[in-house]
Every structure is written in C-alpha cells, then in structure tokens.
C-alpha cells in the first residue's frame, strides 16, 4: 500500500541546481545531533518495524501511497498535525479489519534531503508539533490498542508508541525529578548513578557509531575520518543536553495535545545554494511546477467533476458554502466564486432495510454506495438523513463524491428522543441531551469521533470528514402538539432569547428552546471547526404557523411553532430556513377547506396541496424547504385525498406521477425545493389502521403490503418468488396440492405473499368457470360448510374468483378483526356478535377515517372504510409493459391463473414465525387482537365450479406446511416505476 524512503539532513552540504554535490557535516551542534538521530531512527527503527510489517509511520516528506487505498480511508485528515502517521495507521487498521494481507514498507535505498532546524525556537516548534500529532493519532485510533484482532500492530507497535513514545516524556521527566530529589536528600548511591549514566552514554554512542558504520556499508559511502570522529564525539554528549532538550519539547507537545492547543509553527528555510545559480534553479523549478499543475488540472477537467467551494469570512475565519437569507425564496450556494440560487431536489434516506430495525444500523457501505449512485442518477442534488448513520454512510458519501461529476450534498438531522418528550411534556428537561446530540452529530460530520456501542443507535469510528458536503442542519422531529402546549405552560416566563448567533423575539417558550438548540449548533460548529451551514428546525402542518378553521380535529391545529420568531443574527453568515413535512392527504382540512379544495393550480386543476403551499410561502420571511413529501405505493390504504392523492392503494405508476406533481407544486409555489419521502421501503413501520394486527418485534422480517407507511420508497425490497402473469416457468419446483381432471394446483410463499397457481385444460372466463378457494388457518374455528362442501375443519377465509366485481377474499365472520375492533370495541360500525361455524363470511375492510363533524358547516361525516379484500386482476411482473404493482391475480385469458394473497389478509401477525391472530373472542377480559397462535400448516380446498380439484380426501384440506424463515430474510432490491417519474422531473428542474 505504501513505501517510504530515508530522509537525510542537508544542512552544511554543498547543493547546486537542486542536486547534492558534496555531503558535508553542519557546523551547528543542533543540526549535527539531528543527523545522528535521523540515521538511528531510520536505519535501526524503521527497518525493524518494516521487517514485521508493523511500521506505523512513513514520513510525509518522502512516501509513495496507493491512491485507491488512500481514498478508501478518507485521505489525509485535516484535523491533525500528524497527518502522515495518522494515514499510515489508518491504512494498517483498514487492511487488518478487512482481513487483507497488505504491506507498508521502508526502503533505505531511496533517499531525500531535507533542511533541519538549526535554532532552538524552530526546533522546539517542530518537536512539540510532532509529539502532538502522535497523540492525535493514538487518540483517533485508540481502539487498535491491545486488540488481538489487529495482530502485532495492535499488540506491539501501537502500545510501544503509546507507552514509550507518547508517555515517554512524562516517564523521563519524572526520572530526572526523582534523581534530583534523591540526590538532594542523600537517598541514593552516587556510585551507581554515575555507573548507570556511563552505561547509558556508552550505549547511546555505540548505537550512533553503529548506525554510521551501517550506513557506510549499506550505502557504500566513504565518510572522512574527520566526520566520523566528529559524529562519535558529539554522540557522547547526547544524554547531557540533546536528549533532555527533546524530552522537554516532546512534553510540551504532550501538554498541547491534552489541552487541545492548536497551531503549526513556522520554520524558516534558508538558501542552500550559491546565489549565482539560485535564480536559474528557481526558474527551472517554477517551470516544472507549472507543467505538473497543467497536467493535474487537465486530467481533472476531463472528469468534469465539480467539488464544493467555500467562502471564508476574513473577520472570524468562518468557512461556509451555503446560506439562507431573510426574505429570500431559495437557499444559495457558493460556486464558481459567486453565490447562486440553489433549488433543492432531494430524497430522504432512512436507516432501515429488511431484517433490521433502524437502530440496528445494518446498511452496508456497498449498499450505501450503490444507493448514492442511483440517487445521483435520478437527478437529485441532496439527501436528508434524520440522525447519525453508521460510519459506512459517511465513508460511502465521501468516496462517492470524490468520483462523482457533481457531488451529492446532504442535510443532517439532530434526533430528539420522542419518548422522553412525551413522558415529561417538557422540552427543557431534554435540553442537555439535545446539546449532547448536537455536539456528537457535528463531530460525526467532521470525522472526529468514536462512538461506543449502544443498542438502538449507530456507533463506531467516524474518520471521514464530509463537512464540505453539508448543505444544512434540520433539528428535531414532528413535534407532538400536546408536548408543545405543556412546555409553553410550564415555562411561560420565557419570551425572548439572545444567543451569540441566534435570537428569538416575541417567541413561545418552545420556540425559545428551539432557538437555543439552533444557536448551539452554530456555536459548536464555529468554535470547534470554523464552519457554518444554514439551520432549520423540523416542522409539520399540525404545528405550522397558520390557522386552519376547517380542521375537524382540534389537536391538529392546537398550537403553532413559528419560524419567523427565530433569527440568525449578523454573526452567523449561513442564516436560517424553514423546514416542513407536507403531505396532500393529512391533516383533514386539506380535504374540507373550500378555498383550498377549489384552488386552481398551474395546470388549471383543483389542488388543495398547491393552495396550502402558497399560503406557506406567503407567511414566511425566509426560504421554505418541503423536507418531506410523497405518496406510498402500497396495496393497503389509510387515508384519502379529495383529489386522488391517497395514502395508499396506489400502484407504482400512480405513485410516481403523484410524487412528480407534488414536486412541481412545490416549485410553482416558489419554495426552496423539496425532499421526497423516502428512498427505500421501510418494513419496520406501521399504519394507524393496522397497528393492532401484527407483531411489533417481527415487522422487519416480512413485507406487509397492507401497510402504506412501509411503502413510500422509490426502492423496493422484495423476494417475489412468483410473478403473477400467467407464466408457469416459475412454478416448476413448487408444492403441488392438486392434480385432478386436467386441473393442477400449486402453492408457495415468500416474505410478502401466499401464492396459488391453477393450471386449467382451457382458458375460460371466470363467469363461466368460477374458482372458489377455502383456506384453513386455525384448528377448531372457521366455517365447515360452504359452497356445497362439508369439511372436517372450518375455512377461516374464502377466496372468490367469480369474475366482474366478485373477486375478493372473505373472512369467517367470527375471525373478522375489523368488525371486532371497530364494531365490538369502538362501536363505529354496525355489529352483531358472531358465532363459530355460522357459515357466514364477511368482506375484509380497513378503516380510512373516523366520524367527523366539519367545523365550518357542522356537517357530520360517517366513519369511512375500504374493502381491502377486493382483488385486482393484472400483471405483477415489473418487466412487463402492462405491469401493475397492485395486481392480485392474473388474467383468465390464459390457461394458468396465478393468485397472490398478502399475509395480513389472512390475519398473519408474523408469518416468518408462523404466528397468526388467535381466537379473538376466547377471553373477553383481554383485547382479542392481542391473541396469537403458532400454526402448523395452511389448508386449502380449490373448487372449479362445484368440483374440488385438490388431491385431499373428501372433507380434508390439502395441507401446505411451509418452513419458518425467522429473521433470515431473502430479498432483492428494485427501482420502482416511481423512481423514473422523479428522475424525469428532477432532471428537468434547474
């Protein structure tokens, strides 16, 4: 990976035209002692470390590095004065972590010449800086120390540099002080002192003479007897003045490290050549440098890469590349030496993937890099993350942007633990935790922290500084209105705030709390890193600054959080912006406010979403970013919008079209841009109308297509064992449960669906040849007699494919969880307590809206539900021209009909462990929806007309005993059709 050579001291030598003509010893004792030290350090020290491949430093002045390896670890660290050692240690560490056999070697035959300090002031600055750099490297990579996984490098080399090099000055100074103490109080044998001193001097001289001889032998050099004698004599004096001097200067460096005293320390170089040749030498060097620069910039230009530029404030040395000015509509980006308006075209990026909760931080670096590439190709210029991601994200972002034609910028969130806010109803009790999270997040962004393992949070070593790509901060979450109200009550005396960078006027106590958090972001970033970015706090429609008299639910318009009350003052150059999550279907006033419902957008269509965005724009005194917008592409549905922009039951084309329209509305409203929600589907989530029906802990392990919240993503995770398209090729190895009279039936499953395939002798319309399927889930439950059959066990579900509008899944009325929750428990739908084996099957509904009284008219709207059991005919193959992601069964125009049934439609709580809802009426003292039962197998009857075509005996079910998959999830990722709609609109927006 790396090779480095020897560095020799040129002081006193004769140099002409940049070449060593004659090697001479310097006259200054300080420079002469450094020659001895350099020879000893390189030929003895580095040869030994290199032999065992544990060399921890290659001199920054003379090393050759594998560029790919350097990029892989993030390059030189800007926050250390020992960047050469830090880089070499990081390369060792990365190779050992990845189990790679790579070498870092020292080549004594390669030599470069350098000028050493010949005065004490410069020498002190150099040595204290070196020692500070050593301390910074040891601290940054402290997790290597004494760790067997890092082999000899972690068990020998790094402990050596910690105990003998970095702590060495303390040990040696203590030795001198103890010696002086014991001499003063006559507590030591003086004879032993002088004997040990003599041994030390002779030992040091022996090493020094040995290294000079070794150099002469290995390099075939002939030093004069005079030079050799001079080196020998001076080496005898090392312990009396040179060694204590270096110890003291190293101790100063250690002190500076502990107290974070910064600074480089200048070294003034002196001319080494005669004046007659100097001007020609410089002319040649300048010409050479110009040629190299031309080549570098020429190569870089062929890549057409655009990297971030920054404006540095000369007064306070703050660097910033983005700003949000008061009374401006967009953020501005400093590029090409000037400020330009910057329209945000973004995508939110979560921490979830199948098989893991967000807190597991399970996304790999390879996945991040792949996603970043796809996001960039979509035309996005921004990503937004809500909280600290694992180190892999920052590494992937850095490496991607190093190669990208245009970098991806990002907004970083500061997470606030909602549970604590809801418990205390007092934001100020979370203030200390908020400030800690701010500081931790800033250190992560700058690659300057190691976070210890903590369950539910990302952790690890953060070494990649990605601050150059940070477009702004968004503090917090969607605030609970009750918590905001209670915070305001408890701290009613707080009305204003004056911070160094942010202030709040005529503000509520909660707004002041936010201003304090924003001020802390600014203060910490500037004081520690001398950087600034625009800052916002997270907000949503529920707590916006507008009044919504048409809102039927009081809690959705109970309190306002007004961004206009918080100011970035003149000390903070990057300013503040407003950030909102805005969806078209929620809250309900978007459906019932007549002015908004009738508002005409730029297309000439009624558009309540566009109306709200206009109001948002008109009411703010700063740029407004819609940091969440979108429509889920799910089979299930949880809310409707009057203009068809529903929360669910939208196929991928409908999702993409609506998402693109929402972004167009954002741009037309003259807002600063939008960040679509979200990049990837999130299996761990739930929706309000299905949350009681599944197992919370098992959600990430299966794909619940009935939950809209899981399917906002532009990237789908799916196994899709079967494409419902009438093609039989993917059924050849599946379980056969029927083969009778020319009809063959197969069954299989995956993480999303239960599948059935029926091969028929001839394609016929369902109206002529209806299909009825009985499904048995629980023993001792269900309807035993249905469709002319008499079964020993009851059918819990019945699937009708009868053509027209008669294609649906029905549930045994006794097993109807919707009727139980909204009829029996909440009295919102007509309800009669069912009996077991009643012979009655009910449609499967989901709730859409609770009863509403419209405040403007006092009109009462009833409870609203949706028949999610209704089945859609279509083609579920994404590669087909007529692809429909909502397709449940294939066209009967082919001999083979394929059917897929979502697990939740069959009352599965966690199909990965074969857990289903149990007998909901068995115990009236508990919530029946919490009951669960682990099943053995699923039984089927399949009827064509009135004939049962399964191979089971009369009255028996054909059983499908599928294997649990537990927490081992098999899936592939796929860009949804909606991705390409966003690609088109983003690429068309400048």
Image: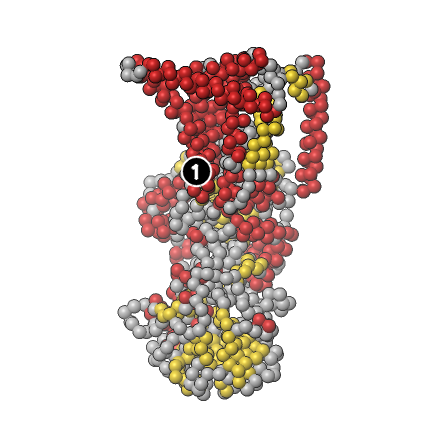
Q: In which quarter of the image is residue 602?
A: bottom right
Residue 40 drawn above or below residue 799: above
On screen, residue 402 versus residue 546, left or right, reads right
On screen, residue 702 versus residue 974, left or right, reads left
Residue 989 in view in this figure: yes
Name the secondary structure under disc 1: helix
> Which percent across, then down, holds residue 57?
52, 32
Residue 114 in view in this figure: no
Q: Which residue is drawn at 49% across and 22% down?
A: 207
Residue 13 drawn above or below residue 852: above
Q: Which residue is drawn at 53% across and 45% down?
A: 100
Q: Which of 218 and 186 is in front in this view?
A: 218
> Which percent across, then down, holds residue 103?
55, 39
> Which percent across, then down, holds residue 684?
44, 59
> Which image quarter is the N terminus in?
top right
| Colouring | secondary structure
Q: Nearer the viewer, residue 414 or 932?
A: 932
Residue 430 drawn above or below residue 81: below
Q: In which quarter of the image is residue 983?
A: bottom right
Q: Residue at x 44, y 69 (%)?
A: 963
Q: Where does label 1 land, which residue?
A: 155
Q: Which of 666 and 136 is in front in this view?
A: 136
Q: Which of 450 and 564 is in front in this view?
A: 450
Q: Residue at x 63, y 67 (%)?
A: 880
Are there few (<14), some (14-19), or many (20+) residues within 10 Å of tag 1? some
> Which percent across, then down, holds residue 283?
71, 22
């Amino acid at each position: 990976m790396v090779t480095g050579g020897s560095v020799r001291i040129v002081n006193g030598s004769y140099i002409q035209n940049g070449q060593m003509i004659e090697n001479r010893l310097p006259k200054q004792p300080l420079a002469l002692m450094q020659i001895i030290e350099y020879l000893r350090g390189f030929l003895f020290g580095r040869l030994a470390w290199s032999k065992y491949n544990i060399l921890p430093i290659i001199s920054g002045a003379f090393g050759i590095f594998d560029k790919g390896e350097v990029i892989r670890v993030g390059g030189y660290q800007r926050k250390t004065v020992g960047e050469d050692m830090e880089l070499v240690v990081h390369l060792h560490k990365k190779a050992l972590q990845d189990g790679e056999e790579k070498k870092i070697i020292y080549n004594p035959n390669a030599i470069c010449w350098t000028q050493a300090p010949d005065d004490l002031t410069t020498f002190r600055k150099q040595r204290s800086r070196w020692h500070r750099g050593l301390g910074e490297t040891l601290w940054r990579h402290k997790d290597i120390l004494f760790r067997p996984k890092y082999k000899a490098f972690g068990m020998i080399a790094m402990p050596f540099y910690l105990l003998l090099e970095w702590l060495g000055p303390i040990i040696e100074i203590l030795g001198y002080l103890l010696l002086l103490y014991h001499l003063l109080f006559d507590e030591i044998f003086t004879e032993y002192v002088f004997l040990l001193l003599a041994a030390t001097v002779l030992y040091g001289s022996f090493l020094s003479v040995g290294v000079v001889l070794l150099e002469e032998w290995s390099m075939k050099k002939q030093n004069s007897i005079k030079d050799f004698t001079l080196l020998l004599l001076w080496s005898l004096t090392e312990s009396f003045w040179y060694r204590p001097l270096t110890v003291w200067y190293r101790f100063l460096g250690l002190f500076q490290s502990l107290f974070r005293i910064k600074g480089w320390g200048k070294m003034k170089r002196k001319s080494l050549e005669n004046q007659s040749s100097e001007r020609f030498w410089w002319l040649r060097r300048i010409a050479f440098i110009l040629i190299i620069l031309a080549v570098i910039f020429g190569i870089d230009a062929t890549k057409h890469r655009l990297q971030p530029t920054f404006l540095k404030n000369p007064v306070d040395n703050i660097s910033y590349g983005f700003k949000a000015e008061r009374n401006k509509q967009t953020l501005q980006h400093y590029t090409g030496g000037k400020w330009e308006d910057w329209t945000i075209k973004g995508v939110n990026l979560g921490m979830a993937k199948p098989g893991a909760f967000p807190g597991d931080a399970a996304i790999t670096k390879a996945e991040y890099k792949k996603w970043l590439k796809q996001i960039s190709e979509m035309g996005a210029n921004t990503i937004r993350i809500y909280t600290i991601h694992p180190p892999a994200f920052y590494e992937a972002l850095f490496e991607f942007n190093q190669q990208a034609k245009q970098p991806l910028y990002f907004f970083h969130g500061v997470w606030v633990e909602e549970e604590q806010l809801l418990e205390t109803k007092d934001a100020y009790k979370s203030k200390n935790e908020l400030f800690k999270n701010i500081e931790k997040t800033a250190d992560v962004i700058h690659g300057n922290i190691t976070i210890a393992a903590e369950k539910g949070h990302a952790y690890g070593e953060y070494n990649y500084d990605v601050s150059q790509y940070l477009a702004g901060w968004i503090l917090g979450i969607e605030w609970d209105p009750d918590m905001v109200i209670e915070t305001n009550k408890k701290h009613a005396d707080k009305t204003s705030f004056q911070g160094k960078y942010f202030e709040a006027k005529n503000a509520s106590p909660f707004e002041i709390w936010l201003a304090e958090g924003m001020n802390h972001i600014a203060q910490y970033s500037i004081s520690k890193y001398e950087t600034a970015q625009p800052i916002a706090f997270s907000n949503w429609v529920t707590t916006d600054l507008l009044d919504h008299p048409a809102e039927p639910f009081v809690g959705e318009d109970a309190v306002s959080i007004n961004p206009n009350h918080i100011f970035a003052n003149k000390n903070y150059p990057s300013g503040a912006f407003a950030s909102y999550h805005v969806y078209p279907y929620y809250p309900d006033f978007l459906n019932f406010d007549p002015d908004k419902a009738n508002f005409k957008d730029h297309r000439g269509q009624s558009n309540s979403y566009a109306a709200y965005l206009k109001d948002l724009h008109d009411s703010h005194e700063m740029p407004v970013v819609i940091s969440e917008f979108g429509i889920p592409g799910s089979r299930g549905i949880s809310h409707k919008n009057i203009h068809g922009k529903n929360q669910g039951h939208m196929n991928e084309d409908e999702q993409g079209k609506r998402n693109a329209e929402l972004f167009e509305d954002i741009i037309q409203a003259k807002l600063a841009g939008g960040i679509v929600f979200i990049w990837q589907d999130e299996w761990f989530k739930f929706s309000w109308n299905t949350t009681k029906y599944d197992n919370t802990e098992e959600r990430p392990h299966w794909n619940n297509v009935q939950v809209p919240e899981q399917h906002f993503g532009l990237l789908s995770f799916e196994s899709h064992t079967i494409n419902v398209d009438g093609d039989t090729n993917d059924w050849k190895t599946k379980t056969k449960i029927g083969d009778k009279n020319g009809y063959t039936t197969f069954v299989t499953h995956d993480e999303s669906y239960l599948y059935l395939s029926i091969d028929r002798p001839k394609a016929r319309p369902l109206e002529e040849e209806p299909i009825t399927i009985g499904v048995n889930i629980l023993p001792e439950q269900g309807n035993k007699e249905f469709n002319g059959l008499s079964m020993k066990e009851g059918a819990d579900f019945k699937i009708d494919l009868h053509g027209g509008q008669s294609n649906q899944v029905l549930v045994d009325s006794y097993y109807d969880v919707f009727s139980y929750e909204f009829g029996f428990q909440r009295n919102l739908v007509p309800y009669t307590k069912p009996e077991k084996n009643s012979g009655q099957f009910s449609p499967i509904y989901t709730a859409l809206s609770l009863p509403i009284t419209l405040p403007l008219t006092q009109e009462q709207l009833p409870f609203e539900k949706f028949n999610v059991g209704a089945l859609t005919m279509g083609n579920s193959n994404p590669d087909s021209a007529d692809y429909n992601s909502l397709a449940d069964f294939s066209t009967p125009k082919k001999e083979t009909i394929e059917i897929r049934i979502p697990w939740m439609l069959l009352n599965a709580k966690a199909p990965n462990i074969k857990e289903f809802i149990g007998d909901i009426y068995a115990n009236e003292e508990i919530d029946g929806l919490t009951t669960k039962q682990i099943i053995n197998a699923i039984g089927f009857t399949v009827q064509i007309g009135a004939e049962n075509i399964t191979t089971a005996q009369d009255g028996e079910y054909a059983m499908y005993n599928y294997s649990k998959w537990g927490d081992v999830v098999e899936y592939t990722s796929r860009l949804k059709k909606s991705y390409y709609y966003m690609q088109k609109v983003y690429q068309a927006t400048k």
